[in-house]
């Protein structure tokens, strides 16, 4: 049986499932909004988010400034739009690192077996043993706070999940006949990984990834809020939350705007992950991996 | 079964509600919010921090002190003092029978000698050594008489050193018995309050010392609570969780309306400014510096960061200080844009393009916002500013090494103009001279002023110094800052001229 | 079951060791001279030497690590750099606050979450189900810190019915008053999650055959519901509680910072900002330990409830 064809069939079938799921549409709208904002931010934002206008600080929402101004007169809405980019970078950069390292370690573990396998599993377990917040904090303390360090640290923290999935899948696929056949025909392990393993884990990884994008956006905002992520004057939703917290009484919009952005974006990706999960495994609605 | 249960719960609630009212009666304790955690309570090893002063003030006494509410120097432990003719020897006559806390005996000349000599001892590495820079030694003449021997006359000895942290007297017996480390968190002084406890949350409690030689404190216990966050202090004041603290400048107006709180603005004694590192190219170009002085508008900083509650500074000295001279700001509105653009062009940056400056500052909210404002102002002239925020340690390192073009700093002032002007000296380059600027005339004038005891003469010298600095265009003065001491309406407080609390003078109305 | 338990217990040791190793290497991995960074340039040589000794930097790392392990085993977690307290004392004195906060938060989440979930399942496919579903979903997608600042904004500042900060120190009632906002904030995300889990779990159970059979025998719906269905549906929730404690510990950190409460999270964050390494190590170690224990208990209770593992 040709695995690639089967894979294609699966995708088509799943997509049909999702089309009838109303959640998918809502998710799609939100996510589309997110991507548009992040990518085309500079074009759609009404003002220059860096332009200060100190004498018009802390204004309530008005026609000119739909979300009011912040403590040095910058337009809150424009800042909110520009801040979508770091969220995008962190979420997808971190995810990319997680999946990439996860695949490398997972397949290595499965192929090598023995001690290397045990070491890698142990590594996974150690990372999972830390409460995530603590691991992230400690690593940030070492590396120093910045957007880049967040991407790498979040990537490493989430990686074990993907590593385990990849490893499990690799182990099972490894033994199958067609793989032996492929091997005897001279296919290298890398090719096997790409053509056989990845299609199989694709589904689970996709669902995990959906949830993890939401998580990463949440972490970036949380850490930046504490002052351990993106450093002002660079902006991000978390940074805006911190600034809004300082001015919570004078300009609550400074706090509400990024809150809405964060929650909405997280909801979008969670919805997507859920409709994916329902489409792919209609029975198991409750499992948490 | 159900009924019994309900009755049981009812009784429990009743009991618990009662227990919450069994706490220290309000009369006996006030809570004071401090701007930062105390690092140590040993005056000789305090690193120029401002947070500890209200505590130190309560626990220790000095030879002299500031008269409450002013900067007039009056005797504290000392009854009287005499200066020798050459102004190099000062003899202090101590009051008799002043007791240290916890039975550590009488305050004698030995304690004075011990307290000061540990500061000037190079082995001990005291951060306060500079405050006693001209002190050679301390001589015990008799039990209650002690002499300070100076290498040269030191004008600021009385204005800033002795009445302040470095001049506090510790119990020699206690330090020797406990060892320096234990003493640092179990201080023994002779002040109106004695140290009670230092909790794990860094709250420090002091309780009234019954054997105090002066007017006893009114309030039984004071708890000093560190709250670095201005918003926390404000919220705590509003909810009654602390009795004294600062409120944010943003909300100052609305706090004034609050019935249960009293608040006032007090000018802070400090000095905040934007400094140019004249040794790092292209800041060595005077035309560029002049242009920057026009472009940077400190008024916006005062509006944006200080909620327009602070005053613009026209010098590093305060308006009522000896020797103050107002150096006018360079406002963009006074000249036209052309003029500034010309300066930039002459400096080699036509239209400001190609100019990249590095701005180093602290990692806290306020400093970042200031940096952002400056960055935006310079961006109007196409000048690019890279802001680098650092923790205090690395920032001071950067200051020493001069790895920046622009920086922002706040230095605490004292009442003495000489002390306040020392940061521009050549010998402070690589240390606290953030502009890395050196000027022989300035140095010469400063040295002379240090030894001039006649106030008028001294004032003239400082005015000349301010002129020199103004012409050199080495920075932009921003503000002296403002404090917003706020306290519970049922208290009567006495404050220092810069809005600090004198805890032993606080009483209930 | 016993073997499973023992196996899991044994696994704790090497995991903790690895955690310790990572924490220990903090002092070596921090860029620059740790002592100077921490104390600033005014530090005297003596102070620098003291710090280096405390951090173990004056010896080769394996010796220092060994000594550090010995220290930990004997119960000495080191001394805070900035104050004269032992790290262990500092941590233990704030730990109760964090535990109370976390447990209360979990309790609220469980009680309200299960209630909502049951209601939703009961009114399946009606308007109420949809509405509750939306609420649950929004709650589940709200990060703890967002919930915390919004609660602070609306209940403490705008409406003034909750205190804005601290843990209160005027007795039990005051303490509870100070606990409401933080615990609510902490519970929001998990409430949503548990609500949805309960709903789907209940629905799944309801539709199983043997339940239908009991129905056909004429037993009233509510009776079946609460005796049989609930027992079965509770299992995934129990598993999730253990997982949740770990996540709540993380959320507690934000709540403590935002509401200015004392606690393990606040202690650790402050220590990180101040670079008080011994305190960071101590705080993180205890937090990791709690997390591992919580996970272990969760796994064990799930294994206990699952007869397949129990009877192995």
Image (cartoon, rainbow, N blue to C red):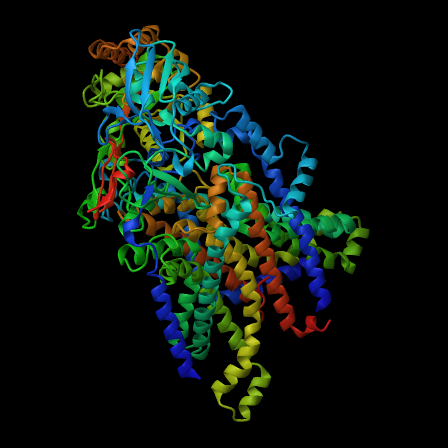
Position in image of residue C9 (x %, y %) = 68, 59
* Residue drawn where x is 35% and y is 6% of the image: B440
Position in image of residue B435 (x %, y %) = 37, 17
Left or right of C45? Residue B206 is left
* Residue drawn where x is 56% and y is 69% of the image: C238
* Quadrant housing the N terminus of chain C: bottom right
Which quarter of the figure has residue B17? bottom left
Left or right of A191? Residue B440 is left
Which quarter of the figure has residue B36? top left
Looking at the rendered structure, the number of numbered marks drawn on it comes to: 0
Position in image of residue B241 (x %, y %) = 31, 51
Position in image of residue C288 (x %, y %) = 58, 51
Say which of C312 and A216 sits in front.
Answer: C312
* Residue drawn where x is 63% and y is 46% of the image: C72
The relative height of residue A40 versus residue A129 in the rendered view (above or below) is above
The relative height of residue C42 versus residue B453 in the rendered view (above or below) is below
* Quadrant housing the C terminus of chain C: bottom right
Say which of B476 and C92 sits in front.
Answer: C92
Say which of B308 and C131 sits in front.
Answer: B308
Q: Is residue C2 visible?
A: yes
């Amino acid at each position: 049986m040709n695995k690639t064809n089967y894979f294609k069939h699966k995708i088509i079938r799943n997509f049909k499932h999702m089309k009838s799921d109303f959640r998918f549409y809502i998710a799609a709208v939100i996510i589309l909004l997110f991507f548009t904002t992040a990518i085309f931010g500079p074009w759609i934002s009404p003002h220059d988010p860096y332009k200060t206008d100190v004498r018009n600080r802390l204004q309530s929402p008005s026609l000119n400034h739909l979300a009011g101004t912040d403590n040095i007169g910058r337009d809150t809405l424009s800042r909110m739009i520009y801040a979508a980019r770091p969220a995008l970078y962190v979420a997808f950069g971190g995810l990319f690192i997680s999946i990439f390292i996860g695949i490398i370690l997972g397949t290595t573990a499965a192929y090598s077996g023995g001690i290397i396998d045990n070491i890698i599993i142990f590594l996974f377990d150690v990372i999972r043993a830390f409460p995530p917040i603590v691991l992230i904090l400690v690593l940030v303390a070492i590396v120093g706070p910045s957007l880049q360090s967040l991407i790498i640290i979040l990537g490493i923290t989430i990686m074990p999940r993907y590593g385990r999935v990849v490893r499990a899948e690799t182990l099972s696929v490894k033994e199958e006949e067609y793989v032996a056949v492929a091997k005897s025909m001279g296919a290298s392990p890398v090719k096997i990984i790409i053509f056989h393993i990845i299609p199989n884990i694709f589904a689970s990884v996709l669902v995990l990834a959906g949830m993890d994008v939401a998580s990463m956006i949440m972490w970036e905002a949380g850490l930046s809020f504490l002052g351990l992520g993106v450093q002002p004057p660079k902006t991000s939703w978390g940074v805006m939350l911190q600034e809004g917290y300082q001015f919570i009484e004078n300009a609550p919009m400074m706090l509400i705007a990024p809150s809405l952005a964060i929650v909405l974006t997280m909801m979008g990706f969670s919805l997507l992950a859920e409709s994916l999960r329902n489409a792919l495994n209609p029975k198991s609605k409750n499992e948490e991996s | 079964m159900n009924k019994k249960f309900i009755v049981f719960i009812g009784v429990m609630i009743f009991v618990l509600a009662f227990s919450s009212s069994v706490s220290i009666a309000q009369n006996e304790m006030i809570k004071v919010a401090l701007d930062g955690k105390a690092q140590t309570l040993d005056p000789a090893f305090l690193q120029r921090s401002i947070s500890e002063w209200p505590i130190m003030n309560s626990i220790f006494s000095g030879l002299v002190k500031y008269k409450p509410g002013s900067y007039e120097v009056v005797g504290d432990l000392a009854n009287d003092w005499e200066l020798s003719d050459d102004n190099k020897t000062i003899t202090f006559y101590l009051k008799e029978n002043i007791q240290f806390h916890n039975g550590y005996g009488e305050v004698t000349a030995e304690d004075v000698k011990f307290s000061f000599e540990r500061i000037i001892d190079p082995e001990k590495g005291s951060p306060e050594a500079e405050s006693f820079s001209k002190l050679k030694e301390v001589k015990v003449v008799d039990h209650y008489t002690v002499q300070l021997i100076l290498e040269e006359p030191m004008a600021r000895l009385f204005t800033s050193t002795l009445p302040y942290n470095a001049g506090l007297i510790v119990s020699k017996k206690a330090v020797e018995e406990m060892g320096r480390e234990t003493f640092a968190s179990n201080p023994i002084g002779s002040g109106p309050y004695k140290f009670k406890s230092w909790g794990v949350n860094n709250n420090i409690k002091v309780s009234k010392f019954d054997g105090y030689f002066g007017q006893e404190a009114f309030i039984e216990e004071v708890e000093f609570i560190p709250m670095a966050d201005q918003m926390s202090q404000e919220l705590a004041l509003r909810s009654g969780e602390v009795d004294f603290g600062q409120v944010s400048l943003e909300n100052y107006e609305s706090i004034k309306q609050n019935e249960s709180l009293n608040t006032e603005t007090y000018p802070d004694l400090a000095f905040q400014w934007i400094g140019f590192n004249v040794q790092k190219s292209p800041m060595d170009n005077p035309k560029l510096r002049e242009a920057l002085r026009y472009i940077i508008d400190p008024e916006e900083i005062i509006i944006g960061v200080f909620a327009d509650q602070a005053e613009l500074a026209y010098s590093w000295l305060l308006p009522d200080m000896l020797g103050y001279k107002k150096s006018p700001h360079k406002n963009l509105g006074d000249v036209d844009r052309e003029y500034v653009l010309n300066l930039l062009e002459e400096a080699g940056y036509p239209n400001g393009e190609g100019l990249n400056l590095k701005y180093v500052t602290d990692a806290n909210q306020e400093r970042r916002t200031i940096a952002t404002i400056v960055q935006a102002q310079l961006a109007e002239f196409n000048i690019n500013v890279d802001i680098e925020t650092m923790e205090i340690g690395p920032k001071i390192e950067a200051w020493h090494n001069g790895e920046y073009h622009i920086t922002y700093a706040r230095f605490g002032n004292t009442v003495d103009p000489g002390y306040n002007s020392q940061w521009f000296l050549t010998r402070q380059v690589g240390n606290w001279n953030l502009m890395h600027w050196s000027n022989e005339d300035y140095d010469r004038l400063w040295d002379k002023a240090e030894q001039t005891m006649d106030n008028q003469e001294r004032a003239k010298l400082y005015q000349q110094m301010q002129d020199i600095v103004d012409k050199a265009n080495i920075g932009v003065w921003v503000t002296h800052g403002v404090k917003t001491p706020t306290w519970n309406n049922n208290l009567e407080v006495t404050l220092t001229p810069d809005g600090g609390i004198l805890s032993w003078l606080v009483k209930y109305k | 079951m016993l073997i499973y338990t023992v196996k899991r217990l044994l696994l704790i040791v090497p995991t903790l060791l690895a955690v310790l190793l990572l924490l220990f290497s903090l002092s070596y991995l921090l860029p620059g001279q740790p002592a100077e960074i921490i104390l600033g340039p005014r530090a005297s040589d003596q102070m620098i030497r003291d710090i280096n000794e405390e951090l173990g930097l004056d010896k080769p790392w394996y010796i220092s690590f060994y000594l550090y392990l010995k220290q930990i085993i004997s119960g000495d977690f080191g001394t805070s750099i900035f104050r004269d307290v032992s790290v262990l004392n500092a941590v233990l004195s704030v730990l109760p606050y964090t535990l109370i906060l976390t447990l209360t938060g979990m309790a609220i989440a469980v009680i309200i979450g299960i209630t909502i979930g049951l209601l939703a399942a009961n009114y399946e496919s009606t308007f109420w189900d949809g509405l509750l579903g939306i609420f649950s979903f929004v709650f589940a997608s709200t990060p703890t810190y967002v919930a915390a600042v919004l609660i602070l904004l609306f209940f403490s500042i705008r409406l003034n019915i909750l205190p804005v900060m601290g843990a209160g120190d005027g007795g039990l009632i005051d303490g509870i008053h100070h606990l409401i906002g933080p615990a609510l904030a902490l519970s929001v995300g998990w409430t949503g999650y548990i609500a949805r889990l309960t709903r789907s779990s209940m629905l799944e159970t309801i539709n199983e055959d043997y339940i239908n059979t009991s129905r056909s025998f004429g037993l009233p719906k509510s009776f079946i519901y609460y005796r049989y269905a609930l027992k079965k549906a509770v299992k995934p929730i129990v598993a999730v509680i253990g997982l949740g404690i770990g996540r709540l510990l993380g959320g507690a950190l934000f709540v403590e910072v935002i509401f200015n409460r004392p606690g393990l999270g606040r202690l650790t964050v402050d220590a990180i900002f101040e670079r008080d390494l011994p305190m960071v190590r101590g705080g993180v170690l205890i937090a990791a330990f709690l997390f591992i224990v919580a996970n272990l208990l969760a796994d064990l209770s799930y294994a206990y409830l699952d007869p397949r593992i129990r009877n192995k």
